[in-house]
Amino acid sequence: MNLGNWLFRQATAHPDRPALFLGRLMVADYATFHRRAAEVAGWLAGRGIAPGDRVAIFMKNCPDYLIVQYGIWYAGAVAVPINAKLHGREAAFIIGNAEARLTFASEGLFETLLEVDSGMETLLVDGADYRAIQQCDPLPEPVERAADDLAWLFYTSGTTGRPKGVMITNRMLIAMSLAYPVDVDAVHAEDAAIYAAPMSHGAGIYNIVHVLVGARHVCPESGGFDEAEIFDLARHFGNAQMFAAPTMVKRMTEAAKRSGETGEGLRTVVYGGGPMYGADIIEAVAHFGPVFVQIYGQGECPMGISALSRHDVCDRAHPRWKQRLASVGRAQAPVEVRIGGPDGAWTAQGEPGEIMVRGDVVMPGYWQDPEATAKALKGGWLMTGDMGFMDEDGYVTMQDRSKDMIITGGSNVYPREVEEVLLTHPGVREVSVVGHPHPDWGEIVVAFVVGDADPGELDALCIDNIARFKRPKKYLRLPDLPKNNYGKVLKTELRRMLEEDT
């Protein structure tokens, strides 16, 4: 089924319901939302975009993001969301690898693509050509698509240093969306979804269930995350729901305590995407009350592995409440979760191993990468690369994340991609990148360098080639990197050195 059908049905049944907002300003009801998406679809079809073709979205958060996304789906095409924080070269790689026929880009990001001469057709959203789309004949209804046809092609960083395209089908997104009111939060037409985290990621795909029920979609005027703005919007709209990285939750709590904000109107904050320190969530609940729900997912199983309920997050009466609060909750309805040992056999209850998941939210594989697919999917199970254990009540506790990944400010950084950039400097003989705990960002990126390269030059090299959030915050020089007998760099030793230096 084409996911666009949910918007089509809502617009048919409740055309006057308020749909899209920029700040407090309504820019479209559901009838207008549908019509403009259908116009985008008609324009795409007129340009020869066929069902299954890829169309990229390199945009900051704004109401037109959803119009473009549903226009792509109406046309039967596959949306390729690109993080607006990425460098133009990184975005160009994704566009090229996906073989995207066209890219919709926001102002600023459009110019970034032109600077790197991506060679791909790019349309400036809110430019004259984009506005002219409204003169096109709208597509009468969404193109018919099968449940296992691709809907999203989501690029996630990999340990090879190149991002991999996760193939996300209509079935996956439907299963994830229908699980939301069961495992995460009830959702109603009176709700307001506030998009303060990137719409290219988990915050964005949560729009689908809100479209299904005809809820309101609110993009902050700032285009991102500002604590005071979030509090104002929540108070204005009421019944507000948002997705937030743990660092965002921490910042909201600190800002609210400084300003006296109570979080009025903020009904639910779904958090995930990185480690939430126990003290931070306890403090957040103490200030805002029972508004928090945790989810655990990966790009390969978007937002859909497990969930820690509102009750479990705020419960302080259960004898094991601290252990439960430190967990990522229990398996969501459409999936099975198991813990596997090195031999692939399931571990005994409470024994550590690799977290495995299978079900309708799990990807069929990586785009044009059978080798990576074979490593990730074994016997129908997704091998998450995350280590943990499951207790007798089904609560899963993560002991460590995917081997070397760094999560800074809710964004994933794989050391290899940073290392490969730094190694292009002639003054760098060897380099190893690790994460180091930070109270505000969760982790910061630290580079250990062997050689005589100037840190300022390394900074400039990173700025020219990768997103700014991936740039190391520290460069530490060593005569040699610590290695084992097989020549493998001992990152545990590097992390220990950082701890001793703190």
Image (spheres, rainbow, N blue to C red):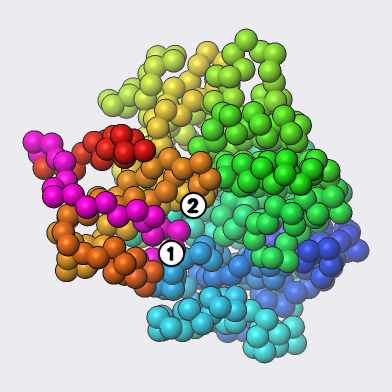
- Which residue is at 70% across, 31% downward? 285
Tag 1 residue: 467
Q: Tell me how far mark 1 sits from mark 2, CA to CA.
A: 11 Å
The residue lying furthest to the left in this view is 485
Which secondary structure, mark 1?
loop
x, y percent for residue 7? 75, 60
Answer with left or right where residue 188 lies relative to residue 310. right
Q: Is residue 443 above or below residue 78?
A: above
SS assignment for the magenta stretch, majority? loop
The stretch drawn in magenta includes residue 227: no
Whether residue 318 can be seen here: yes
The stretch drawn in magenta includes residue 472: yes
- Which residue is at 31% across, 38% downward? 501
- Which residue is at 44% across, 14% downward? 349
Magenta span = 465-486
Tag 2 residue: 411
Mark 1 crowd level (few <14, some 14–19, many ≥20, 10 Å Cα): many
Q: Amino acid at mark 2?
A: Ser
* Figure quadrant of residue 25: bottom right
Q: Is residue 112 above or below residue 481?
A: below
Q: Amino acid at mark 1?
A: Ala
Say which of 182 and 399 sits in front.
Answer: 399
Tell me, yes or no, whether the two marked residues, 1 and 2, touch with CB atoms within 8 Å. yes
The residue lying furthest to the right in this view is 16
- Which residue is at 76% across, 46% downward? 259
x, y percent for residue 22? 77, 66
Say which of 355 and 474 sits in front.
Answer: 474
